Amino acid sequence: MSTAARGSNSHRPADRKVAFVSGASRGIGKAIAVELAHAGYDVAITARTVHEGESREHSSTIKRSDTTPLPGSLDSTAALIEAAGVRCMSVPADILDHPSLVSAVDRVIAEWGQIDVLINNARYIGPGHMDLIVDTPIRVLRDHLEGNALAPLVLIKTVVPHMVKRKQGTVINITSTVAYEDPSEPAGKGGWGLGYGFSKAALHRIAGILAVELRETGVRAYNIQPGYVATERIAQDMKAFGFDASTGAPAAVIGKVCRWLLESPDAPKRNGETIQGQELCSELGLLPGWSLAPAAR
C-alpha cells in the first residue's frame, strides 16, 4: 500500500484517538507507535527513512563516515500498525528541517482532524555524539540543539494549541540520563559527547515547564527516561564506542510505559514528572516476561 493510501481518511472511526510519533522508523519510536496501535490509536509516524535500505550519514563521529543502511523504515512500521487494525499515516520529515515538521502536523490535522498524543522521540543522528568538545565544530553542536531540543519545541508549538482548544491531550518527551548525569569516560571510550548531553538537557526541561503552563487546560506533559535500550542502531553502530546492545532492555518496554501514561488512572497525578521507564515497567509488570535484573535496580 502506498504512503498516500495509508494516509487517507476513508473509514476512520470518528471517536478513535490519534497519536503522532516522531523517529518512528526504528527503535523506541517504532515500539511506541506499534504499542499505541494495539491500544486502539490511529498513528501518524514521521522520520527520514521512508523505505528499507535508504542510505544516510549516521556516523557518531566527525572522524569517519558511515552511510550503510540501518534496519527500519516508515514503511515497515506502518505495516505493523495496520496489522493491528488501525490507520497509519506516514508523514516523512527531518528534525533539522523545521518547516517539514510543521507540514507533517498540518497534514495530520487536515486529514484526521486532531492529534491527541504527541511523542517526541526523534533525535539527531550524526557526528558529534562521540566526539570531544575541542574536536566538535560549533555547527555540529548547533545541529544537536536543532534536532534534539528545538525540533520537539516546533512540534509542541504546532500541536499543543489544537490540544488546548479541545481541552485534552498528552505530550511525552523521550529524555535521557545524559541530560543530568556526566559520563564516566570520555566520548568514544564508553562515554558521550557534549552535543548529545547538552541538547538532551535542553529537551529535559521542557515537559515540567509545559505541565505548569498547561495545568488548567486538560493537557498533560511528561518525560520518559528510557534507560539503555537495545535498538537497531545501538546494535549496528555503537559497539565500536564501547556499548553492548545485548545488555539493553527491549524497546517494547518504553512502548508499554507510554501506554500506561495514557491509560492509567494514576498517571495524571504524575503530570510534569520524569518517568523512569524501565523501573516503572518492571515494578508494574507491564511487559510480560521482562523485568529488571536485581543487580540493575
Image: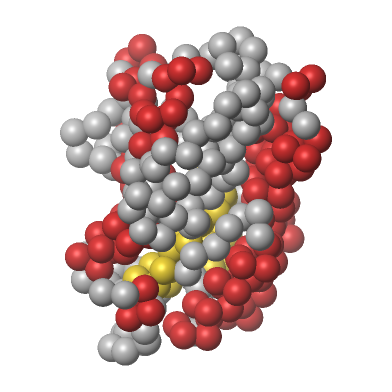
Q: Is residue 259 above or below residue 165?
A: above
Q: Is residue 124 above or below residue 292?
A: below
**270 sits left or right of 254 in the view:** right
Identify which residue is drawn at 29% across, 57% down: 76
Point out the image quarter for the C terminus: top left
Identify which residue is drawn at 32% across, 89% down: 10
Q: Position of residue 252 (x, y in %)?
A: 31, 43
**62 sits left or right of 277 in the view:** right
* Rendering quarter of residue 40: bottom left
**248 sits left or right of 126 in the view:** left
**Residue 55 seen in the current view:** yes
Identify which residue is drawn at 31% across, 75% down: 2
Identify which residue is drawn at 61% across, 10% down: 185
Q: Nearer the viewer, residue 22 or 53?
A: 53
Q: Position of residue 200 (x, y in %)?
A: 65, 38
Q: Position of residue 180 (x, y in %)?
A: 66, 28
**201 sits left or right of 175 in the view:** right
Point out the image quarter for the N terminus: bottom left
- Which residue is outermost to the bottom? 10
Q: Nearer the viewer, residue 57 or 45?
A: 57
